[in-house]
Amino acid sequence: MLLLMLGAGTAGGQGSGSETGLPPRAGWVETGTRYPLYTGRGIAASTFPARIVAYSPAQRVTALAAAGDTLWIGTDGGLFAYSVTEDSTAAVSGPVSRSVRSIAFDEKGALLVGGDRGVSIRRGGAWLHYTVTSNRFFEDVTDISHGEGRMWLGSYGRGAACVEGDSITVFARADSLFDDRVLSVIEENPCTVWFATASGLCMADTLHWMSMRYGSRLPIGAVRDILFDEGGRLYCAIAMQGVAVYNLGRVGRYGPNDGLPNWDINAFSLDPTGRIWAVGKGGVSIFDGSGWTPLRLSGYSAARYNFLSCFHDVEGGAYLGTDEGTILYLSRDTVGEIHVPQAFPSGRVARIRPAAGELWFLTGSGLFVKRGGIERVELPKGVYGGAIEDVTVYGDEVWVVTRFGLLHYDGQAWKIFDRRQGLPTEHFTVSIRDGSGDIWFGAFERGVLRLTGRGWVHYNGESGLPDMRIENIIEDRSGTMWVMTACGGIARFTGDSWQEVILPVQEGDAEKRQPQADSLPRLDPAIRFLGLYDGRSASREADRKVCIGLDGTGNCLVGRSDAVYRYSESGWQIMYPPAVDGEIEPTVIMGSSRGDVWLGTARHGVFISRRGTWHGVDRQQGLSDGTVLAIVEDAAGDVWIGTQSGGAVRFIHHPSR
């Protein structure tokens, strides 16, 4: 078996053509950057003291492979195994990747799993892992395929790699690889390799590299999958361009008029009879050498499925993975279903609201509440399910904020509030109930509405709001309401109007002073007070991202890419976030009851400040997605994070639970 443990040492062997003096388009044998391999076990764990548990949906079945009586299933929510003899599916712990993109077996039967956090190998009941702690190439593995005595890997953003003997060679754009976003790799023969990338097709042999994007008559677009048939013809699934077949310089193009289910084909499979299966949105088609024939499924409408993966076992059975957490199994004239257990109902979690020991999740597929298990909240009929922006819960009452009005449940029935009830808008973005029982609603472009015991109050630009587009509303421990607007402006309510808040700029050591008497227990020592400043303002800039929240004791927090601000009775305090590659784009901020500050970002995961030290947690440390949309602390002191596409993540501070 080929060992896939990558060393962290410096590059050895042959480098790229530009570094060694070779012709700039020399073949793959003479290009690339070679690294030594080493063996090891385990992965680097987060230094932040908490157990991280991801609750991701497993609806997208992205990879399939079978060995013996076990079907291995790769999803965005982890790896699963289906037992044919027992007709049961169970989650498999062990792989380093939460989102599995590729599954393969080596010549000795070891299971290889590639995904968003690297490659894992299961051999003899034990797992070996290959992550970015070994090499940045393993940041997002998209494909694993066999070659002649070697393994090929594709990575989204890091190029392709060849594992051979005791070394790995990484190929990137500097080596004439057309695009570092490699979706599939296939070896035609020991000398020739084809790379499917997000920008087109690329080929390399022992003498040169060649891009197939121009001059080859292949359609231009992302090549999602490639496969050779038994006659040596190369099949390419090109995004929104159907299927292209390349053979000795000739190109055949096929679309729905030729028997394909759709222009959007996702994957291929070669069955034991030599036929090519193409799966995609709307069904499956089979190429028998002369043309494409749509597959008819007895008792099923193939048009309702979006097929993402396909695999054939040695007996000719076909497994078709969908984006609904279902796998269709075809054996002769019968069709069966395999259902993947779902840990969470949706990939996008925009908000998480705690209420009376429950957690309410606003997701891309509707509203859910965690009461032991996770239950869907049934809303009034209409377009509300996919248009929810926020929820506020108190007692038996629920307010649901949508893009088409407000929904109110009084404990018995739902009532709809929109323009028919005299509201100035129907597109709302946020809601909150204050300490006196009033409900505040932020509108997409019409300011703030407040529902009091006497009726509705509307605040607009004339009321002092810096912008009518409201993105968040909070109430601090003194009962003061704060708003954040789409332009980055921040304002607080003074009792009858809004006053824009000007954030001070740190001005050297002269402005440093010790915390005053109102400083809270366990205040992060990295936070210090700001003194007088020269009138300059960090309040908002056209390109500056801002978020607001509350610390553990109810003081206002403001997160920016360059600093984190905290407002206390003695004025503003400031601390600086850690340095990262590229600018931090904050999305959400929260202070926990432990005195920590949690800063969610776009693409960089979450940063936690504890006693003056920042801890960064991203996909490599256990997050299911690097873009964080929501952070909340539950009644037990655990922190929940909502992500853009990876569901919810729970930080358990008591690992025994």
Image: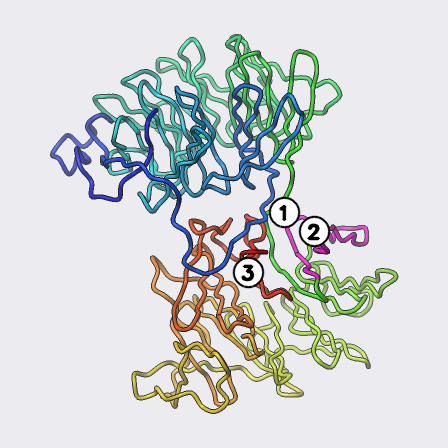
Can you tell which mark lies on residue 366?
Answer: 2
Q: What's the magenta region?
A: 358-385
Residue 360 lies in the magenta stretch: yes
- The residue type indicated by label 3 comes to His
Above or below 463: residue 27: above
Above or below 514: residue 76: above
Extreme residue in the right direction: 412
In this figure, which residue is indicated by the disc labeled 3?
Answer: 654
**Disc with the residue nearer the chain's start (1 vs 2):** 1
Tell me how far mark 3 sits from mark 2, CA to CA.
Answer: 30 Å
Query: Is there CB contact under 8 Å for labels 3 and 2?
Result: no
Tell me how far mark 1 sits from mark 3, CA to CA.
Answer: 26 Å
In this figure, which residue is indicated by the disc labeled 1?
Answer: 346
Structure colour scheme: rainbow
Residue pictured at 17% horizontal, 33% vertical: 14
Residue pictured at 66% horizontal, 88% vertical: 495
**For residue 400, which quarter of the picture?**
bottom right
Q: Residues within 10 Å of mark 1 (few under 14, many from 20)?
A: many
The residue lying toward the viewer, choosing from 394 and 269, is 394
Query: Is there CB contact under 8 Å for labels 1 and 3?
Result: no
**Disc with the residue nearer the chain's start (1 vs 3):** 1
